Every structure is written in C-alpha cells, then in structure tokens.
C-alpha cells in the first residue's frame, strides 16, 4: 500500500511539473503575416496572439484594451519595423510590457521612397503617413522573408533556449518552403518579357516584389492606405495605363475597391482576382499562410500578364 501511495505521489508531482516544463512561449505578433511566420517556426512551442487579424489593415489599426492585456502577458513581441506599425510604441508603453521585441526587418536592405516609387510622384506619402522614408512592405521579397524568419528564430531561441533544437529544425523546414516558392515565382515570371510585366494595385505595397522579380507596379495611392489619391494622380495614372496598355488592375484584400473600379472603367483594364499585400486571408481562404499568399498573388499576376493566345 505504501509503495502504491509513493508511486501515486511521484506521478502526481510529475504531472504538476509538466505544464511549467512544456509551457509554450507567449508571442504577440502585430499582424497576420508575422503571426504565421512565428507559428511556422515555433510550432507547438509557441502560443501566438495576432493583433491585426485576417484581411485587416495594420496601417490604420486602432489598438484595443485587449491588445494591451495581451502584450502585458507576453514573453516576446514580434513587429515588422520600418514604420509599419505607427501605433506599436504607444501600445507597448500602455501595456507596461518590458520584455524583448523582435524587429523582423532587421538586416533587410530597405527601399527608399523615391526608389520604390520609381518617379511616379507618390513618394511624398512616405513622409506624410508614418512610414518615414522607407517602404515597410519588405516581406514581398521572399529573400527578405528569409531574413524575417532568421530574426524570429533568434527571438524565440533567446526567449526559450531549452526549445532551441526544435525551433531550429522548424526554421530549416520553413526555409525550404520559402526557397521553393521563390523558385516558383522566378520560373513563372521568366517567360514574360520584362517590358510586359506591368501591374496596377490599390496602394504601393509591392515595391520589393517589383525590385526583386522585375515587375513594374503602379498605384494611385502611396505606401500607406491612409493616403488619398488626388484627382491629378488618378488622371495621370489613367493616361499611363492607356499609353502603356496595362492589362489588369488588382484590388488588395485590405483596400476599398472603388478607386480601382473607376480606373478600370476609364481605361478598359480589367479588374483581376484579389491579391494579398499586408494581411493574410482567413484560414479557409486562398492566402491563409505567407507561402500561400505568395502563390496566390503569383497565380493572379501571371494570369493577367500572360500573352494573349
């Protein structure tokens, strides 16, 4: 009887200790793309709270008291940086969070506003709407997404050194997925002549994609969705679309479609399928993960750019 009691006590103590040993790292990510990357690398070792949800717009997000509570309970906060989340510093301060913050864009070579806009006259929005002089949408290049993944791995390992082996294995597997989707992007676009790779989107979120993969993106609105296109901007874009015979315009999942619908009516360019720039879709949508998002956008772009048969 004593032996059974001793075994029972030992088992009970072991069970009591398990939650402390196996507790996941509590991570708060600012928006869905980052939240997905944390989940891909963290796996079962993380519990992720994402502040800006699917199809949400981080440019104009208004934090809630629940967000402040989530930060206050976090072990790690993951942000994009480059001025993307103009509200995050205020939220961190309000929450009382004193822990580590991983800035995923650390090490990325940022695109300056003037370079990103390629002389189309929208770079002033970079200064007016909280992004500073840089385009914050660095994840649109898969090479940059790999830098994001490296930074997330470092942050997670620092927060939970005992989980390092699992985290590194997950990171390596994720990096292989990123390499595969990048190879797919390059192979799909390769047959399309560079001069024909011209696309119009709702706002300037694809500068890194364009620079990396040789696509010219035009947008009536600057890098932040807070910006508003002037009548002159719209007229200039309509003239350019007609002159260059641009085939399609794309509405992003976070954008109001009315402006591009107007441009489509006046130019004859068709509205293509929905593309994803700053946020993922819901879990049952076509862009539930970052890799899915890049494939979905590629399919839409390639369909629009394919030469007429």
Image: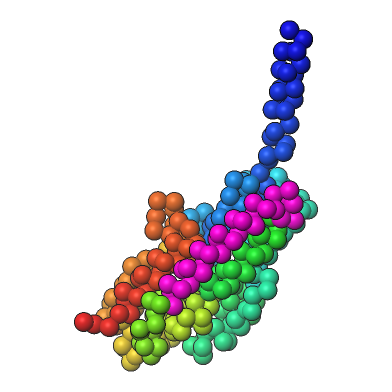
Q: Quadrant of residue 82?
A: bottom right
Can you give x and y, in whole percent of width and height, for residue 284 in the image? 40, 51
Q: Main secondary structure of the magenta part?
A: helix
Instruction: Say if residue 57 shows up in the picture.
Output: no
Q: Quadrant of residue 16?
A: top right
Question: Does residue 104 sit above or below 195 in this rendering?
Answer: above
Q: Nearer the viewer, residue 15 or 198?
A: 15
Residue at image x 57%, y 87%?
115
Can you give x and y, in whole percent of width and height, for residue 118 in the image? 51, 88
Question: Does residue 122 sit above or below 182 in this rendering?
Answer: below
Q: Nearer the viewer, residue 302 or 78?
A: 302
Residue at image x 73%, y 18%?
7
**Which residue appears farthest toward the front when viewing the image?**
3
Q: Quadrant of residue 190?
A: bottom left
3 on left or right of 55: right
Q: Which residues are magenta?
A: 157-186
Split into 4 quadrants, where in the image is the N terminus? top right
13 on left or right of 295: right
Question: Does residue 12 sit above or below 29 in this rendering?
Answer: above
Does 184 appear in magenta?
Answer: yes
Split into 4 quadrants, where in the image is the C terminus? bottom left
Instruction: Say if residue 24 shows up in the picture.
Output: yes
Can you give x and y, in whole percent of width and height, for residue 167 in the image? 64, 54
Residue at image x 58%, y 50%?
43
């Amino acid at each position: 009887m004593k032996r059974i009691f001793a075994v029972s006590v030992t088992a009970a103590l072991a069970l009591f200790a398990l939650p402390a040993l196996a507790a996941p790292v509590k991570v708060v990510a600012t928006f869905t793309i980052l939240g997905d990357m944390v989940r891909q690398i963290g796996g079962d070792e993380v519990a992720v709270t994402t502040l800006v949800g699917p199809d949400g717009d981080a440019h104009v997000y208004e934090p809630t008291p629940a967000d402040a509570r989530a930060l206050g309970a976090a072990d790690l906060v993951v942000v994009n940086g480059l001025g993307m989340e103009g509200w995050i510093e205020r939220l961190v301060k309000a929450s009382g969070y004193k822990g580590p913050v991983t800035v995923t864009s650390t090490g990325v070579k940022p695109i300056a506003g003037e370079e990103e806009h390629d002389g189309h006259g929208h770079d002033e929005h970079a200064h007016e709407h909280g992004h500073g002089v840089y385009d914050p949408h660095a994840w649109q290049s898969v090479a940059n997404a790999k830098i994001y993944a490296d930074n997330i791995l470092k942050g997670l390992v620092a927060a939970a050194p005992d989980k390092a082996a699992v985290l590194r294995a997950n990171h390596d597997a994720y990096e292989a997925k990123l390499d595969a989707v990048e190879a797919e992007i390059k192979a799909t676009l390769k047959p399309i002549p560079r001069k024909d790779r011209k696309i119009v989107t709702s706002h300037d979120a694809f500068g890194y994609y364009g620079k990396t993969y040789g696509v010219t993106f035009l947008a009536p609105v600057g890098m932040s969705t807070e910006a508003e296109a002037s009548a002159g901007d719209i007229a200039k874009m309509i003239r350019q679309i007609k002159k260059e015979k641009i085939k399609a315009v794309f509405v992003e999942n976070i954008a109001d479609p009315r402006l591009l619908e107007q441009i489509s009516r006046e130019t004859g360019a068709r509205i293509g399928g929905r593309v994803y720039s700053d946020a993922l879709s819901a879990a049952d949508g076509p862009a539930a993960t970052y890799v899915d998002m890049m494939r979905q956008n590629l399919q839409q772009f390639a369909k629009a750019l394919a030469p007429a048969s």
